[in-house]
Amino acid sequence: MELEKQNRALREARGSLEESRNRYADLFDFAPVACFTFDTEGCVIEVNLAGATIVGQDRSRLIGVPFVALVEMVDPALLRQHLQDCSDTRGPVVAELSFEAAAGLMYVQAMSVPVYDATGRAVAFHTALTDIGALKRENLRLTLLSDLTKDIAGSLDLDVILKAVARSVVPCLADHCAAYWQTDDRVLPVVWTHANPSDECFSRDNRIDSDDKLSLVAEVARTRRSMVVAEAASARDQVLREMARDVPLSSTMIVPIGCHNGTGVLMFIASSSGRHYDGNDLALADEIAKRVALAIANARLYDEAQAAIRSRDNLLAVVSHDLRSPLNAVSLSAGLLLRGPDSGERTMKQSLLIRRSAQRMNRLIEDLLTATTIEAGRFTVARSRTSVCDLIEEAHAMTEPELATKSLRIERRGNPPLCDVMCDRERILQVFANILGNAIKFTPHGGTIGLYAAPDVNMVLFAVSDTGPGIAEVQRPHLFDRYWKGHANERHSVGLGLYIAKGIVDAHGGNMWVESKAGEGSTFFFTLPSLDDGDAAD
């Protein structure tokens, strides 16, 4: 009776074990990840269906065969090193492997764990191969696009941009790359790049008629539609046919570069690498072409902007030169009338009006020329050692006549610092004239304008405040813009004063800004580097 119980328990245990083995076999066989068991030499002991699919052979034919004999490893030594590392660490080890198999070029992550015998010696390795090809391709795509963007962003020349893209994609995406540009009735090669320098002789000067029905490059330029060309189809195209005589071509992509000012074509050719382009590769090529088109468009816009600036500067130079001569004559004539012995009161008034108008026009011309040099980065200042106290005194004195007309007064807050600044005296007085002139214009009749200077670390801080209506918050960011005016009806201003004032301060190494509250007035600040007694003049 006892023996029967034992036999029954043994049969149940064997059944459970068999059931467990079957479950393991099912899990192993139908696992979506390729699973292998290798011996210490890398020969296959066991493999599941996914593993056999990768290799492209029946499982029974794989047992006992070295894995490196079943696939074409990019670096055969990597698998042996991976298994050795697994044995040495006596635990799980991960490595990246790449090889050509039935499914094409594969990138896999290999994770292996050792199998020990009774003595504790590693005699085999369970290895799972996870396909990371999609991740690799995405990393390649992002890296390639990032590098390409850097390479073409710094250039505004069509030839340089096309040469940069051809260099960027070889050899990571193509073994050969050609860039063409369509001009009138021809599609001309701009650059050819090759992974192998010995291929430099191919297709250098081939010029293609735009209506050539046998040219795939001309077809893409006409239709602006991308295409992937299989090896057999390449015989139709003269360029590819000529290359195929000496280089085995495996696949080709041709994509258009669509721009408003023309059409280009990029041709990616795979040969020695054995690549076979697919939809993912074509999408990447199209993205490259879009970025190249954007760079070319930016270059075109820059050229147009530069041409417009040159035209404007030339016109301004001609107009200012032609206007100054008659204005000087007008000013001189008005001065002679004022000094004449027979000048009556009416003549005096008209002469003063003429002279003031001529002076205003001369200042406008000077402002336009100054604004142009600031914008072009050619503005310079002639620095000399200048007393801060003298600057404040002269700024106050030159506004006395305007202050008197509105019964305004200047409030000098505190004592100016007893130090000097290195500045262009006339230009800094021009800054004061501008911001004091604005303060006078916006301060109500009988109001007060503040003027002061104070030390600020290694700078001197100057400030002009008014008790006017203040500046709206939405207007403040534009105050120092060129040709900007706060009110459209300001007919006596072209909006250059504050732009020029800030340009002058910037040229001195200082800064300029404004603080204002609606209904409480405004304060304009600017700084200049201070010059201690021990500092030498530049």
Image (spheres, rainbow, N blue to C red):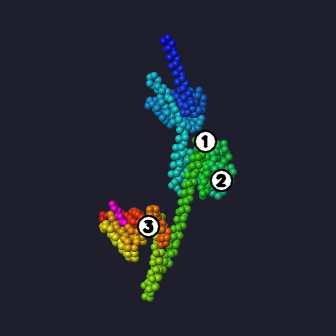
Residue 276's tag is 1
Frontmost residue, 12 versus 164: 12
Q: Is residue 171 above or below residue 532?
A: above
Which label lies toward us, 1 or 2?
2
Would you name the residue on which mark 2 appears? 222
Would you name the residue on which mark 3 appears? 498
First in sequence: mark 1 or mark 3?
1
Q: Is residue 521 above or below residue 32?
A: below
Element carrying mark 1: loop
**CA gap, disc 1 and disc 3:** 62 Å
- Which residue is drawn at the image coordinates 63% and 45% (left, top)? 228
Q: Residue furthest top?
A: 1
**CA gap, disc 1 and disc 2:** 25 Å
- Which residue is drawn at the image coordinates 42% and 70% (left, top)? 442
Tell me which amino acid carries mark 3: Leu
Dot 2 and dot 3 residues touching (CB under 8 Å): no
Residue 177's tag is none
- Which residue is drawn at the image coordinates 33% and 65% (left, top)? 454
Q: Is residue 518 above or below residue 230?
A: below
Q: Quadrant of the C terminus?
A: bottom left
Q: Is residue 459 magenta?
A: yes
Frontmost residue, 83 versus 446: 446
Which label lies toward us, 2 or 3?
3
Q: Main secondary structure of the magenta part?
A: strand
**CA gap, disc 2 and disc 3:** 52 Å
Are there few (<14), some (14-19), or many (20+) residues within 10 Å of tag 3?
Answer: many
Can the viewer see residue 359 in this picture? Answer: yes
In the rendering, at what x and y percent does residue 413 appear? Answer: 32, 68
